[in-house]
Image (cartoon, rainbow, N blue to C red):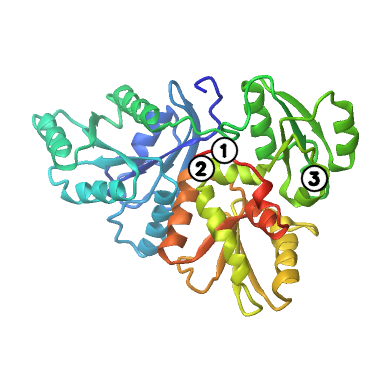
Amino acid sequence: MNNIVQIERLHIGIFGKCNSGKSSLLNAITGQYTAVVSEIAGTTTDLVSKRMEIPGVGACLLMDTAGFDDTSMLRRERLEQTKKAIEKTDIALIICKGNDITEEVCWMEMFVQQKVAVIAVLNICEQRSDTQVLLDYIQQKAGLDAVAVNARTGEGIKDLIAIIRKINQQTQKGNTITGNLVKAGDVVMLVMPQDQQAPVGRLILPQAQTIRELLDKNCIIVSCIPELMDKTLASLVTPPELIITDSQVFEYVYQRLPEESKLTSFSVLFAQYKGNIKKFIEGAHAIDKLTEDSHVLIAEACTHAPLGEDIGRVKIPQMLRQRVGQKLSVDVVSGSDFPRYLNSYDLIIHCGACMFNRKHVLSRIEKAEGQKVAITNYGIAIAYLKGILGRVVYPEC
């Protein structure tokens, strides 16, 4: 399991007051002039992100946020962007500067309550005699890892990265896409439609990531389009141990499924890899309660131009309306757009979220649960609507 390639990008958020050195810290970690540094308060307006590979940690996304004490005219908009960054943050770096860090400690406690790992970063731009005193105070008051750095010179950055590496290793639980469904030597068949929705000349991200993981697990991979499924099965000496399909052809594949083979979909696998599949299965049962007066929200993680056969905007709404009536109301949001208040909805159906990290998806699940709104995902919903959810497998939690 430890040899499986990391495909989940660690999201590291940098938070603190205006002019505390957040942008300087981002630049110091990346070794590049990624964020604008200025003495003018509120220089960082929109969220600044940088993708990079940190040795010993892996693929990361660093996010520089606006100061949480922003008093400018754009305060509300900037803080809203900061809140969105919190929803997807795996590790929060809280920058402390000055003698009074009471507010920063409150933020640390808030992050901990939201189950976000926190590192207190004491930004020391000059020699101070009370550095260790402040570090001890943070560690005793909040019980967190704390490190002193000079964001301008880069002093202490290696120590900070060492702590990030330690936390990442402690929190990584070997969560993989296929989990315990396959082992080395298993034959796995992938059924992947190459229709109008498929990108030209490449596979979609869940397909590419799943193939890479199966290779790392030393599985034997057989791929085909739905129309060649029968011929592909006939070419095999024995049926595949597992068939992974695109959710939109669930029913077609199920009708041709060998008795000896297990069935799942990329979206179902990502329901657990990115979120909480038990919550999604519970949410799917809300479909039975829908009526023509109900209101459903379709949430897409990525943004793309709508297509005629779009699964989220066209096919799933059609399936739902065929079941409960044509007057069913369906809204669609994409990317980072997600309503603050969900109470007007009877059900949320989320995509596989290949473009989100797990923390982001779990934040949305918790938000829906907190407002008592059922939530499921594309693959689980389609399998439920087709009456085959009981035959679909997924990794054990």
Residue in front for this viewpoint, 147 or 1: 1
**Residues at discs 3 and 2 in contact (Cβ within 8 Å):** no
* Residue 337 appears in the picture as rendered: no
Residue 29 position within the rendered picture, expressed as x and y whole percent measured from the top left: 39, 29
Residue 114 position within the rendered picture, expressed as x and y whole percent measured from the top left: 33, 50
Q: Secondary structure at mark 2?
A: loop
**Residues at discs 1 and 3 in contact (Cβ within 8 Å):** no
Q: Is residue 263 shown above or below 382?
A: above
Q: Is residue 372 shown above or below 52?
A: below
Please give the name of the residue rendered at 24% of the width and 33% of the height, measured from the top-left corner: 145
Mark positioned earlier in the residue sequence (3 or 2): 3
Please give the name of the residue rendered at 71% of the width and 61% of the height, measured from the top-left corner: 316
Residue 184 position within the rendered picture, expressed as x and y whole percent measured from the top left: 64, 20
Residue type of the residue flagged with mark 3? Val
Q: CA distance from mark 3 to mark 2?
A: 29 Å
Q: Is residue 263 left or right of residue 31?
A: right
Q: CA distance from mark 1 to mark 2?
A: 18 Å
Rendering quarter of residue 127? top left
Q: Residues within 10 Å of mark 2 (few under 14, many from 20)?
A: many
Q: Secondary structure at mark 1?
A: loop
* Residue 326 appears in the picture as rendered: yes
Q: Is residue 141 shown above or below 70?
A: above
Report the residue marked by disc 2. Answer: 357
Report the residue marked by disc 3. Answer: 253
Residue in front for this viewpoint, 196 or 268: 268
Report the residue marked by disc 1. Answer: 395
Mark 1 vs mark 2, foreground winner is 1
